[in-house]
Structure formats: structure tokens, C-alpha cells
Image: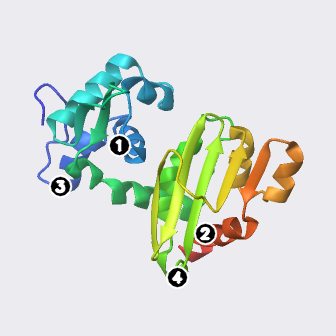
Amino acid sequence: MTSGRRGYQQACHVASALDLLGERWTLLIVRELLIGPRRFRDLVEALGGIGTNLLSDRLKRLAEEGLVARRKLPPPASVPVYELTEAGAALEPVLWELVRWGVKTGRDLPSDASYRPTWLVVAMRSLFRPERAEGLDLRLEFRVGEDVFHAVVEGSALVTGLGTIERPDVVVTAAPEIFRRYENGERPEVLAKTGKWKLDGSKRALMRFEKLFAVKASL
């Protein structure tokens, strides 16, 4: 543990892990980097409420522990980004279990809290049920406000990430507040009446995709 930091000082792996991961914002930084490489300003925007000095401190600590690395994207971007190392990416199942626990226990999400549709990139992976996807080949693209992300189902496996994909079966375009209503269970045909929801492609593909995820009763 880094000198000068308070810790539990217990000979227990849970306590040892919490000495690092239990610090405020740390697991949410990991969540953002599980979505994909992030610029410093991307993290500041996604983690509304974190100060830049605190974010720098958390990233430095994660780098010292070998969980995060900093690199420069190739041209034409040529900007520095932070990304998880192999050891950092190994934390993904930890976040999956937190998502599943929250869904299973029915903990309410504050209606007035900050919301980013890209958080679904990790949530989808945590709630995916591969036994329901056998034999399916689905490609979906989501354009929500300024965010673009995708989901590909192939061979009972799910891959999600940022950006566009080639030959999507369906493209969903929506305003963030409308997409959140979709996440909360409102049907596309209802959302379409707002004028802020558009579906291009196979409606059936979207319906099949929706059935691939666990709900409270089946967790």
C-alpha cells in the first residue's frame, strides 16, 4: 500500500483489495475504462462530481498498482488515453456482480441522478445469458445523443464497445432521456411517439436481442 494512505491493516484479501478499490471513485474509474480507452477529459465528464486533482491521484495510484496504463493514440488522433491493463480488466467480473446484485435486490436508481447511456456497455455484458443466444447472429448499433456504441451477438457470445459497426441489423437513434425510458422498460412503439426515438432496420432483431438478458426473476 502506498505510504501515507490509510488502510485497514488486516491480513485479509478482502481488506487488502478494499485498501485500493474501496477508495471513492476508484471502481467507477474502472467502469469507465471497461467501456474503452478514455482521455482524461472524457473521464472528468463521465464522472461528474470528481475533481481533476482527485482523478489524477486515483489514476496515478491505479497505474502504480499495475491496473491502468497511459498511452498515446496513433495519428490522426495522437492524444493520450488511459486504459486498463490485463490485471485491471480482470476486475470486470467484480463489477458484473455489483450490477447483478443491484438488479436482483431491486435497488432504485435515483431519477434525478446523472446518467450516461454508455454505462450500458458494461451492464449488458453483466446481464447477458449466453444460453439464450445459441445460434443467433445479431448486430446492433445505438446512437444516443452524442454517444455511439454497439453490441454484437455471435456464437453465444456478446461483444460490446464504443463506436459504429459494419452492417448492423438495427440502428437505434434516441435522445438520452428517451433511451433511459427504454432501459426502464418502455416499449419502442411508445417511445417513437415522442419523436426522439428512431429505429432503422429489423424490429425483430431488437426484440430478440432484448430477450438475451437476465431480469430480476431469473438472476
Which label lies toward us, 3 or 2? 2
Q: Amino acid at mark 4?
A: Gly
Q: Name the outermost residue toward the right.
A: 193
Mark 3 element type: helix
| Residue 88 in picture, x, y percent from top left | 25, 48
| Residue 89 in picture, x, y percent from top left | 29, 51
Residue 61 relative to residue 140: left or right: left
Which label lies toward us, 3 or 1? 1
Q: Which residue position holds label 1? A: 30
Disc 4, disc 2: CB below 8 Å?
Answer: no
From where the camera sits, is residue 213 visible?
A: no
Q: Which residue position holds label 4? A: 135
Residue 38 relative to residue 8: left or right: right
Q: Amino acid at mark 2?
A: Val
Disc 3, disc 1: CB below 8 Å?
Answer: no
| Residue 19 in picture, x, y percent from top left | 22, 41
Q: Which mark is residue 215?
A: 2
Q: CA distance from mark 3 to mark 1?
A: 19 Å
Q: CA distance from mark 4 to mark 2?
A: 21 Å
